[in-house]
Amino acid sequence: MEAGQMEAGEPAEKTEAVIEVTDLRRSFGSFAAVKGVSFSVGAGEVFGLLGPNGAGKTTIVKMLTTLLRPDGGEAKICGYDVRTQAARVRQCIGYVPQALSVDGSLTGYENLLIFAKILGLKGSERERRIRELLAFMDLAEAAPRLVRHYSGGMVRRLEIAQAMLGEPRVLFLDEPTVGLDPVARKGVWERLLDLRKRYQMAILLTTHYMEEADAVCRRVGILDRGKMVVAGTPAELKESIGDPAASLDEVFAHYTGNQLTTGGNYNELKQVRRLSRRLG
Amino acid sequence: MNLSRSAGSAAASVEALFKILRNTLNSVLAMTEMEVRKLRHEPSDLLTRSIQPVLWLVIFGQTFAQVRAFYPEGVSYQAFLTPGILSQSVMFIAIFFGISIIWEKDMGILQKFLAMPVPRLALVLGKALAAGVRALSQAGIVFLLAAAIGIPLRWHFPGLLGAACVATLGAVFFATLSMIIAALVKTRERFMGVGQLLTMPLFFASNALYPVSIMPSWLKVVAMVNPLSYMVDFLRGALVTGQLDNWALDVGVLFFASVISVAVATWLYPQVAG
């Protein structure tokens, strides 16, 4: 899939920001994971946080989804502060964590059903949303089967469907295609963009795959060691290094002086390996 | 005028409170239903896990029936032991269930739940009641198997119902206790160590295997503060001896312990994701 062939969000226009991050910081002990990051994402926009493992992507997502308290700075989702209005933030977001989060011992349909019931959806509206999302994610046929027997791509698509049940205005995806083969990866991208067209939600995804950022995101922010070094549309970023034909890899290398390699520490590596194994 | 306005806002806040309670209850029930559905997909799981408790009854029970000091309350030792083993099953299942939040953290399920617009209390209670569902179905099977091998048990409907409720309450307590420990130790390896350190004395320093009366006095004190003893005591009354003089104390202790441990677990639960 060439860059820009998929519809990566709507053309640039001024819309209200659904994610506003200002000087966000977080440390773990003496290690500063996020060192003053600022960016904003408009309604309906697809924004990619790009960077190697350990750059702070997951930490940022955890703070924006209210799972982790920032040490400093401010983050607002749909106008609500993640620190002081966490319950309201949770009402307008959907979240697909990096690790697998659906239950293998339930069917695909049941995974959505239980989640919808926990959310408090009822009756025909619940059924309608479940059926529609299953159809959208190409899972209608697989719905009565146990998720344990799903392929990696199907699991990811089910997780995205699950996160969409509450019809969130912002969807967070942490490394949505890590551990998937290229075909499955492309399937996830296509379904995701279709879904965005239908529901008009903003998407914030993290990735260390450059083609993913190129194919799916309208804008990307490049993170390196806890700082955002540059942000813009993929075309703008390529332009900015004076080579419109450059790949995002080259853009990344230009701004960080690094190749984007899958480094990460022992635990991250272990987690990615485990995930890949589980995804088969 | 003022009065009616404040009455109106009071009514509104009562309504809001009801709405929160209703939503919480909804979420709790949904999480319990999840467990029921999982069990339905894998019923054989329950049966294989019932083998060990039954072996306790058959091997340990028959052998220790020879010890004279173990003949309390005018019932056979195996009958005396059965509520102890049922309680043990409930406790082990509930504690194991609590560990699963560490597993769920590694998987990402926990983070997903925590990012949902659902009160933390609902997540913790839902998990605890789900543990209750699993523990109760397991205990039910052990009960039937115990009856099948000829252990004399009481088939008295109010007794069975009461036993089911108390076993569920016990499961809620032990599941949330284990969630608290999981939230504190954070890794599976460490939990295994702490878990074993905990379950062994909880089981042996209770009235599950032998009457408290034959214990040395220091151990009696431990057994007295051990919530497992109260579950065993109730189940023994309801399912074997028919003597339920202490029922209010048994239920009260378990309820009080559960309220505390649910509260602490609700407070600590979100920290697991960090």
Image: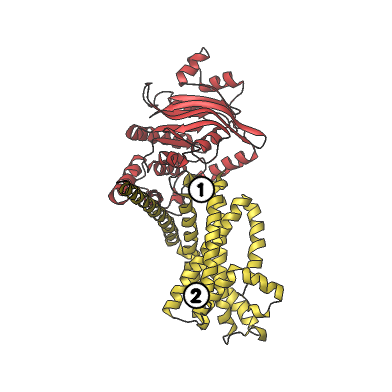
Q: Chain of mark 1?
A: B
Q: Residue at x 59, y 51 (%)?
A: B183
Q: Residues within 10 Å of mark 2 (few under 14, many from 20)?
A: many
Q: Secondary structure at mark 2?
A: helix
Residue A182 shows in the view: yes
* Left or right relative to A44: residue A36: right
- Residue B94 vs residue B117, the one in the foreground: B117
What is the x, y in percent for residue B69? 67, 84
Q: Are marks 1 and 2 on the same chain?
A: yes
**Image-quadrant location for residue B29:** bottom left
Q: What colour has chain A?
A: red
Q: Residue at x 48, y 76 (%)?
A: B144
- The quadrant of the picture occupied by the C terminus of chain B is top right
What is the x, y in percent for residue B57? 58, 77
Residue A153 shows in the view: no
Labelled pair 1, 2 in contact (Cβ < 8 Å): no
Q: Is residue A164 above or below residue B197?
A: above
Residue type at numbered disc 1: Leu
Residue named by callout 1: B110
- In the displayed orientation, state which residue is furthest to the top: A242
Q: What colour has chain B?
A: yellow
